[in-house]
Each structure stands twice: as C-alpha cells, then as structure tokens.
Amino acid sequence: MTTDTDTDVDAGTDLEPQPEGPPEKMLTRRTELTPMLSQYLDCCEAHPDALVLFQVGDFYEAFCEAATTVAQVCEVTLTQREDSTGTYRMAGVPIDNATSYIEALLSADFRVAIAEQVEEAEATSGLVDRAVTNIITPGTVTNGDLLTDAAATYLGAVSITDSDGDASEMTGAIATVDVSTGACRVTSVEHDQIYEELSRLRPAELLIGPEVDTKTIESSSLPFETMQTTHNSGAFELATATQTLEAYVDEPTAFLSSAERRAVGAVLDYAEYTQGDCGPLEYVSRIRRYKTDTALRVDATAIQSLELFDSRQPYGETLIETIDETSSALGRRTLESWLRRPLADHEAIKTRYDAVAALAENPLVVETLTEKLSHIYDLERLTARTAREQADARDMRSLLQSLDSIPEIKSALIEVLTETELPAEILEQLQAELDSLDDIRTLIDTAVCSDPPQTVTDGDVIAKGFNDDLDDIREREEAGREWVSELETRERERTGIDSLEVGYTEVHGYYIEVTNPNLDHVPDEYTRRQTLKNAERFYTPALKRREDEIIAASNRADKLEYELFCDIRAEVAAETSRLQAVADAIGRLDALVSFATIAISHAYVRPEITADTLAIEAGRHPVVEQTQAEFVPNGITFEKGHIAMITGPNMSGKSTYMRQIAHICILAQAGSFVPADAAQIPVLDRIFTRIGASDDISGGESTFMREMSEMTDILHNATESSLILLDEVGRGTSTTDGRAIARATVEFIHNEIGARTLFTTHYHDLTTVTGSLPSAFNLHFKVHRKTHPDNDASVTFLHRVTSGAADSSYGVEVAKLAGVPTPVVEQAQRYIHTEGEDYTEISEQGTHHHDELTHAEMVSVDHDNQQNQASDDDEIARSPRGADTNTDAGINQSDVSANIDVLKSLRDIDIARMTPLEALNMLENLQRRLDE
C-alpha cells in the first residue's frame, strides 16, 4: 500500500494546483483508482472549469486540491481518504444544508458542479451511478435560497459582427436570460455602446464571443460585479447558434440579426449546459428583441451618481427604495426594469399616466389591489421550477394560492374601470390578460393535499378522492394500521400482561414488547425479535402478515403518489406560456399600483409631456423629502438648449437640486407621477451626469482624469434632446486651467450641442458667460448672512433657488460650521481681506451677484429681495439645516440700489465694437463707480 500524500505530489510544481478540473494525483493513477474515485475523476474531466461536489451518502464531498479549497472557503474540517492507491485529502458539506456552503463558493468566484446519485441504491447491487446534474454559477442560479427574492439574475452574452472589416463599423448584440424565470431578451448595439448597455443590464455572469475585444469589457473595468466566462466558441458560430434557437422559436432568422442569433444561441447553449445538458429549457418560451433607442438612456455613471439603485452611503436611500410600494416579487422586478429603461415614446408614457390616474382616483380599490397582490407568490420562478421538474407539492399549493387571487384582482380592476372617465387602456388590457386558469386551479386544488410535506416521495401528497386506486391502497394500509393499534388491547386481555406494548421501528418493524418480569406469561406463538436490557420484543405470525401488508401498501401508495404528482406537475408545466403571461400582467399591474400608491401618499402630480419646455413648479427630491423632516421645494423653467449656471455655497443644496430634476424626469418617463406642484416634461433621449469626485486607482486614472473622461463621453454623445448635469467642472486642476475648461465646456454645449444643461460652479466669474450666450441664465441658492457685534459673520442656507448669480461661496463659513479649528478659520478670513477676490469672493459684497444679468433677471432679483427680506427669518426657522448653526447673508438693499446704474451701463456696452484697451478702461471706470 502506498502512503504518499497530495503534498508530495504537489511539491516542486511551478503553478499552484487548481481546485477546478481533474486532480493531478488521480490522473497519474487512473487505472488504479477505486470505482467511486474513478467516477469523481470522470466528473472533474467533463467539467474542468468547475469545482465538483460529489455525493457520497448524505454529503457532497470534494477531493485533493478541491477539498482544500472547500475546507478553507466553507470553514469545514479537512480530512483524508485512504485506500490501496494512496491517501487523498477530502472535505464535505451536508446535502441537507448545502445551500450556504455553495453560496460561499459562488461568492469566492467558483463555479460549482453538483454530481449526484442518479439511481437508487436499492436498485443496484454494485456501485451507484453518479453524474453532474447541475452546474451552479453566478448567472445560472435557480435555487430559491441562492436567489435574491425580487431581483433578476441575468446571464449575458456579447457577440460582434464585423462590417467589411472596418472596426469603426462593427456592431454587436447583447443577449440576457434569467434562468430562474425564463425571461430572455436581446438587442443590437453599436460597438461603443456595449459597455453602457452592459452597465445597465448588470449581468451576474458574462459570456464573451470570440471576436469581441475584451479590453473594454473586462470584469475589472465594468461598474458592477460579474463573472466573465469562456464558453465553447463553437456555440457562437452562426449555424450552431441558429440551430440552438430553432428549439425555442420558429424561424429565428425572420426577426433576429446574425449578431443577435449568435448572442442568444450562445447564452441558451450555456444555460442548457449548466442545467445538466437536459436539452432545451422549455420555459424559455419568449425571446424578446428590444431597441436601445426606444428608452431613455441612463448610463452607468448617471445611474451611480443619481443613486437610482445603489446608494453611495452605507445606509443611504435610493430612488427605487423610495418609490417601491410593490407587493410582489413580480412587481418589484417590473418596477426596476421600468426605471432602468424609462420610456421614450410620448404615447406610451401617456398611457401609463392614464392608468396611474385611474387608480389614484380610487384609493380604496388601490388598497384592495395591494392586499390581493401581496398573496401572489413569485409566479415566474414557480413556473420555471415546474417546467424544470423541480417544483414540489408546496410549490403547487403556492401556485394555487397565487391564482386564487386573480378573480378578486380582476373584480377590483373592473371597479376602477367602471368608476373612472379616463381612457385607462392599460388597465383594460391587464383585466383581459389576467387569465384565472380555472383548469389549473381546479387540478391542483383537487389533486394536492392542502398541507403537503416538503418531499414528494414520502407520501401524503395527493389528496383523498383524486385517484381511486390510490384510495383503495390507502384504505388497505389504514385497515392494517388500525388492526395493529387494536392488537395491544387484545393481547393485554388475552395474556394478562398489563405492561405489554405494541410498537414499530424502521429497522425491526412491528413488535410486541414484554418486560422481563412478565416473560413467563408470554404465549408460545410469540417469536423473539429483539432483546433489550429490561425487556424482550416479539412478533406473531398474524402481526408479521399485517406488517408485510402495511409496508407493501405503503410502498405502492408512495410510488403511485409520486407518479401521480409527476403527471400533475407535467400538466401544469404544459401551461407554462399561460402562467408566464399572467405573471407578466401581475408584474405590470403591481408596478402601476405602486406608482398610484406613492402618488396618493406623497402628493405626486401627473406631468404634462411637452415638445420643448421643461418646467417644474415647486419640485421636490423624492428621496430627500422622505428622509428629512422638512424640505424646501424648488422649480425650474427652461426650453431646449437652455443652460442654467448655478452658484451658491457648499451645503446649500445645488447637487440635491440637480439630482431632483433628473429624478423627476426619470420618474416621468417611467410612467410615474412626480413630486411637484406641476410639471411639464419633454421626452429626453439621454441623461448625463458629472457629479462628485471619484478616481480609478486600478485603472491609473486620477480624479481629474476620470472627470475629463466622463466629460469626453458627454460632449461626444449628448444631443439637443439630452439632459446634462455638470457639477464643478474643472475643479481638479489649477484655477486658471479649470476655469478655462469650464467656460469652454459651457460654450461648446450651448453652441454645438444645444442640450438642456444644469451647470454648478464655484468659479463666480464664470457666470458672466451668460451675457454672451443667449440661452444661458444664472441661478443661485439664497443665503442669509448676519454680522454679529464682534464682526463675526455666520450664514443660514435657505435652500431656495432664485435668479442671478451668488455673491460668494461662503467657504470659510462652511469650514467653521464643519468644526475646523478657530485659528485656521480666523487666518483664512485674514487672507480673504488681504488677498482679495483671487482667493475668494466675499470682499466684493455682491458685485458678482448682478454681473451680466438680463433686465428681467435684475427686476426679478430686486423684487425677490424686497418681497422676501421680511420673510427670511421665517425661512431660517423652516430651513432643514436649522437656524441654530447658520445666520443671514442676504443682499444689502442700499448696495442693490447703488449698483443698478452701473449694471445698466454695463448692459449698454457694445463689447463687439470695443478694442481690448477700451474694454479695460471701461472696466476700470465701472469698478471706480462701484467703489464710490
């Protein structure tokens, strides 16, 4: 017998042994291995990219390098197995509790191949046959315990088609499938759009076609976690992919391009492979093709900075969490898909508004729908499990409970349609599409017990009265059990042994137990079955006959029950398309009910879709207003091509304001009402953001380089129908360079792109650009500033947007509020007064506030200051930041009056006809007049 270990074999190798694939030690001894280890080696060779978990009794075992990995990742004991061929490391996890261990392996970026016994041990006299029945990967998870309750889990594939060998003309396709539900979608994209579309879809696992340049879509470069998988390149070949597709749809060439067929064919081929190569996945019955230009495009940067689905703070709220009032997993997935792909079609958006309005008119019915929808289980995943022959009896009852709610939901919709005068087209469609599937409901209700066990092979699954043969067998079994239960009383009377008991064990069967002191009274026909410490167990010929009859009847009943259940499950699976259609309708209805609920509870209003105007009256940030006790509403009105230059201190609400407008636009195009008093929203094609500082250390990009990269994307891809949000462009470099880049960016957007743009800046002199750009205007956040008797000044942020440019950034005051040490604050104030406006703008006391304002803006600002001065104290008290930490920094009325003449003179200057020297002389003259 050899006694060498894995360590001996591994020593001296250049590469670290991998847990995936066949163990080197077993390969070298293939002909000597025991039959069971030979099976394990065969499974490892057939699936070299996966870590094999091999069923041995009640455990999944791994050997050699895989065992070490399982022990480390799953934190289980590493043992060893020894036989005539050597000693092999071994680690195992219990099958009944394997989910958490598999989840740990997936989190550690391993694919897990499950090799199970594929025949009953009792049915064979030799080694039980084993085979890989399932490969679990991040993108192909189907186990409910491994899935996020409501979120979709996508497997994606990317393919490329080269147009005449010109790289610039290359087009691609992206296909996704949710193996847990059967949802399959595909789209064509330009080569430079692949990154953006993948960032929106966020597949958990990604297959890359052989022609695709992986540099731009490496896992490390994508803004989400994904496993990049190298699949059989042959699956991407057009002929092979088309053949794979023919098992799912008729004539795939009729509606799918070659690139799309390659992507869908490959993704479905891999999905089949992971499910045990069982052939086509019957529940993938609808392959939907969509176009990216039919939706508002929100790229990865915008999704992240707007915090639509993930918060940048550990416990921060997101937009979807704020508006999610769905009652089912179906609704939650639908709501997320609507937010990821808001509509870009006027009529489609209006149709959703009509549905939400009709529901909102009937709040009591909305409550009823919410309650009934909460009884709907995840029909998509239940249907998929049924089609995969994995659904148990409890799944069938969950399916029944879900379908039982359909008639009441249809009745509630009829009530809404009866009460409303609005053209609720979607609700009419949903009411018609909600098939109550009476045949399936009746089948499950009559066939499956109301409270079945988890395991379908242990009996008590099929309801009484469903099958006559099963009822007859059960009656014989029950009669035998009644005879046995009465035996104890009869034998006590017959033998006179009061302590006599009749019982049953799995090992020894039925017995009659007599304690040792009463053994003298045991009848002669008793045959000893088992000896205990204080008693003996016996059986009689009659008891043995009954036992055989009961066991035989029980086995026949269990077998028949399983056969019947499989037939019932197959009959339900045959209605997969109908079930999926109902699930789709429930998801859409639940999302609409969520929109109506949030509109009712938070006073959202129906937007008006316009051609050019974007106007929001008293708009609110949907997330912030629900997380703060008070919120100051703000609006905006601007046409296509307008640029709003926004100034104001940090903490005044500039970023919140920009995100608020973007959120309102996204909600509006998703079909939701919006948080405002009134809103006019144009149909946007894209939303771009450059908000917040970030870097890419792994990619070698500084904060400024990252900023410029994002700016490049915006300036190349934005159109006049886009919305651009830019926050502090140019702040990552020197003041001179930054100011120049910022101004050039504004001018380029204004002159070349014409997109609606919100541009916040601390470069206060940049606000003068509005004088030379007809479609640009200034906005600022009002601040209340107060000087105390000791000449110390403090501010209160009123969070109110008004016309004109801010007079200061109030950086020193903000530093003081943040707790910067007093000596630093005081020294900074001294620098301000000695170094002038090049350092900060406070010393000018408002001159920038009116630079280059239009006449209308001057009148508006003057009117605002006169009308609002008296109410500033009230606003301070209402300010979400509170009045205890800030005081007033408003505009001095005498300064405003004194500066009006200067501003009028400035307005009348014809800059185009002036020489540089004349302009400088005029500027000096204006400054002198201001000083006087």
Image: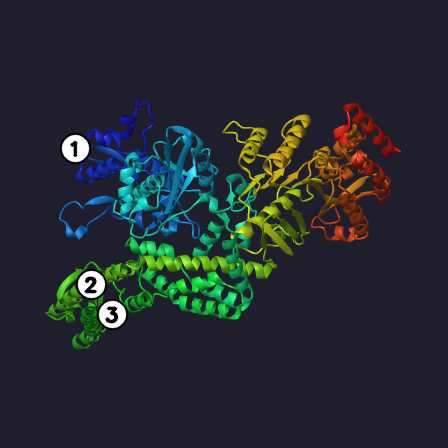
Whether residues under marks 1 and 3 lie with C-beta atoms below 8 angstroms apart, the answer is: no
Query: Label 2: few (<14), some or many (≥20) within 10 Å?
Result: some
**At label 1, which amino acid type do we have?**
Glu
User: Badge 3: few (under 14), some or many (20 or more) residues near its Cα, within 10 Å?
Assistant: some
Question: Dot 1: within a 10 Å radius of its alpha carbon, few (fewer than 14), some, or many (20 or more) residues?
Answer: some
**Which mark is nearer the camera, 3 or 2?**
3
Q: Mark 3 points at which residue?
A: 466
Percent x, y of residue 14: 32, 22
Point out residue 204 in the picture as x, y percentages from the top left corner.
Answer: 41, 42
**Where is mark 2, residue-wise?**
560
Residue marked by disc 1: 32
Separation of disc 2 and disc 1 at Cα? 43 Å
Q: What element carries label 3?
A: loop
Q: Which one is in front in this view, the residue at disc 1 or the one at disc 3?
A: 3
Q: Judge whether 50 appears above or below 329 on screen.
A: above
Residue 327 visible in the snapshot: no
Q: How far apart are marks 1 and 3 (CA)?
A: 54 Å
Q: Nearer the viewer, residue 406 or 904?
A: 904
Above or below — where is 736 with respect to 292?
Answer: above
- Sequence-wise, the earlier of marks 3 and 2 is 3
Q: Is residue 840 visible?
A: yes
Q: Which residue is drawn at 83% across and 36% down?
A: 905
Q: What residue type is labelled 3?
A: Phe
User: Residue 253's image quarter?
Assistant: top left
Q: In this view, does 432 lie to the left or right of 317?
A: left
Q: Which of 142 and 422 is in front in this view?
A: 422
